[in-house]
Structure formats: C-alpha cells, structure tokens
Image (cartoon, rainbow, N blue to C red):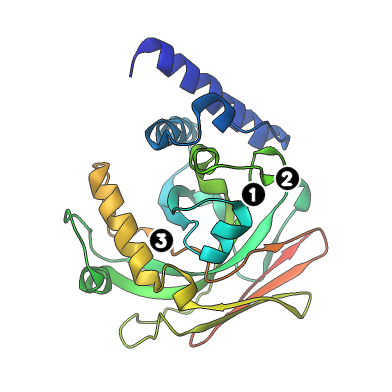
Amino acid sequence: MNDTLKADNNTISERLRNAEREVKAIDPVSQLIGNDDIEMAYSIQDMNTEYRINQGARIVGKKIGLTSTAVQEQLGVDQPDFGILFDDMLITNNGSIERHRMLRPKAEGEIAFMLKKDLTKNKHDWSDILEATDYITAAIEIVDSRIRDWKIKITDTIADNASAAYYVISEMKRSVHGFDLENCEKTLTLNGETASTGKGSGCMDNPLNAMVWLADKMVELKKPLRAGEIILSGALGKFVDIESGDIVRLDIEGLDPVEISIL
C-alpha cells in the first residue's frame, strides 16, 4: 500500500471510529473509495481491527453479513461480507443494551457456530464445517451502520466492520449433527408480536453455505478460521428496526430462545 493510499485509508478508518464513539453518523465512505473496491474496504476494516486490539479488545470470532436475499434487497447490496466480533460485543442472554449507544440499530435472527477445529483448506465443503463445529446456538445480532440512514454500498458496510454492533447467544449447546439447518424455522418477535419470520434456507440456501464462503474467504486472506472462534451465520430472514423500550426475542426450531431488551 503506497503512503498516499495508506493516509487516505487512515482518514476513513478514523472517521468510522469517531462515528461509533460519538454515536454520530457520517456520509458514505463509498463516496471516497468507490462502490467496488472490496480490497480497500477490507483494508480499512483491518485498520480499525488493529486499533481496537491496541486499545485492549480481544477478537472472539467473525460475523457473516448480507447472507439473506431479503436483507440484501433491503439494503441494496448483492454479495455477502464479514466483520470481526470482539469480546465487548457480547450481551448476556436476557440482558439489555442502551439505545443511546447506537445510531439506527436493527435486530437479526441467526445461528452461531462454535468452532473446535481450524479451517485451513483452500476450498471447504459442508463436511469440513460439520467436522470443525463444536456446537450451534441461536443468536440475535444487533447491527448498526455508522453510515447515515443506512445509505450503504457493499464497500461502506465492509469498511464499517460489516455494520457489527452487538450479539446475544443462547446458553444451550446443540450438536450440529442431525440438525436441519436448511429447514429450521425462525421467528423474531418484537414486544411479543411477530416481526420477522424465515428459515435456514434464507441464509444462502443453507447456513453451511455461508460458513463455507467465510472459511474459503479467510484462507484467501491468509487469516484462516481457528478453533474457539464464534461465527455468526448471517440472517435467516429480514431484520427488524429496534428502539428504546423494545424487547426482542428469537426462536429457532430446535434451539433455545434468546432475548434482549433495549433500554
């Protein structure tokens, strides 16, 4: 990376950090880096990952984003991406998060995969993912774009750590073997009312496809997925806007429910 490009990326990464810290939205960074420069967008994400690590945060896993056709259509993008999960993003099941810490948050229903083995092949398949998975749980992901009004292109969300904010996972550990990932039904409720439904097939036809995509992508980037990492599959259906006072609950057939309150 030449010095001029690095300086530009440093400026953009700082803008995104400031937006998150100050809870103040910024204009799309795609206006500066274009809509198609995926490599540059990930380099900006990497800069902020390094910054957070230097500030004491610890990486605990990855999130796959934009896996649902419904969500892609909602946001006007056409491919998945990934972001980094840090230790301070985890909210205890049945816990809470303050609304004022976020800009325009949305809740998604997903499946979390806990890895027990590294994934280091150039090309993976379902059997590799199944063998490497220790257990699965239901997961609510809270996404929040630092880009004003969610007016994002793919490079915006990648640079912005795939719009990651917080996540909640169930305490129940369910074996992935024999679990119908494709057909399991998902219901996301808001204050007791059904707000979003879907099934496993809503996530790239099967969450295992999302996992294969991420495993291959991370090897391509020379950062393979490692044992002990938590991986969020991506949404099984449409996201839900959330506000102060809301209680969000996720039920996925065969898994224990998860819930979070927005204060």
* Identity of the residue drawn at 61% across and 26% down: 15
- How much space separates mark 1 and mark 2, taking CA atoms? 6 Å
- How much space separates mark 3 and mark 1, taking CA atoms? 18 Å
Residue 144 position in % (x across, y down)? 64, 49
Could you say whether the residue bearing mark 2 is in a helix, strand or loop? loop
Residue pushed farthest left? 121
* Identity of the residue drawn at 60% across and 65% down: 108
Q: Quadrant of the C terminus?
A: bottom right
Q: Nearer the viewer, residue 104 or 134?
A: 104
Going by the numbered disc 1, the residue's amino acid type is Asp
First reached walking from the N terminus: tag 3 or tag 1:
1
In the image, 146: left or right of 177? right
Going by the numbered disc 3, the residue's amino acid type is Ile
Residue 43 occupies quadrant: top left
Q: Height in image: 147 above or below 197? A: above
Going by the numbered disc 2, the residue's amino acid type is Leu
Asked whether disc 1 touches disc 2, contact meaning CB atoms under 8 Å apart, the reply is yes
Sort mark 3 into few (<14), some (14-19) or many (20+) by Cα contacts within 10 Å. many
* Identity of the residue drawn at 71% across and 47% down: 102
In the image, 213: left or right of 254? left
**Which residue is under mark 2?**
103
> Could you say which disc has been placed on residue 231 in the image?
3
Residue 160 occupies quadrant: top right
Residue 24 occupies quadrant: top right
**Which residue is under mark 1?**
144
Q: Height in image: 195 above or below 99? A: below
